[in-house]
Image: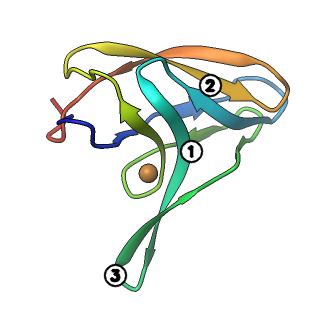
Amino acid sequence: MPGALPAGGYFTLANPSSKPVTLIAAQSPACGSLMLHMTHNMSGMVHMMPVEKVDVPAGGSFEFKPGGYHLMCMEPKALKPGTNIPVTLKFADGSTVTVSFAVKNATGK
Ligand SMILES: [Cu+2]
């Protein structure tokens, strides 16, 4: 990711448990702030909107992908393609999960 451009994060959130979970926030030491966003396409104009939460049904999964939901890394700090950054996902029940995100440039490398 060049310079200080915001970076998008895409992943699939799988919920193997028997209860629905709700993702409410994310943070990473590599980002000034990490926001939940969705992309929404209105008559050819692409907007991004912050979202407050993402529900994942019991036994289901939720896909964050280009053109849809994503994590937005604002004020990224020294993101280098080829490295990994830790991202902590926070859920409505108070639990957190820390996962590793691979940093890729705009061409997916
Ligand atoms: Cu965004």
Residue linked to disc 3: 44
Which kind of residue does numbered mark 1 sit on? Answer: Leu
**Label at residue 105:** none
Q: Quadrant of the C terminus?
A: top left
Residue drawn at (28%, 24%), measured in percent from left and top? Answer: 103
Q: Which of the two discs, 1 and 3, labels the residue nearer the N terminus?
A: 1
Rendered position, 97 above or below 58 = above
**Location of residue 70 in the rendering, given as x and y in whole percent from the top left corner:** 47, 45
Residue linked to disc 2: 89
The mark lying in front, picked from 1 and 3, is: 1
Foreground: 4 or 40? 4
Label 2: how many residues lie within 10 Å, few (<14), some (14-19) or many (20+)?
Answer: some
Q: Which of the two discs, 2 and 3, labels the residue nearer the N terminus?
A: 3
Which kind of residue does numbered mark 3 sit on? Answer: Gly
Q: Any atom of ligand 1 within 8 Å of the CB at mark 3?
A: no
SS at mark 2 in the image: strand
Residue linked to disc 1: 36
Which kind of residue does numbered mark 2 sit on? Answer: Leu
**Location of residue 44 in the rendering, given as x and y in whole percent from the top left corner:** 34, 81
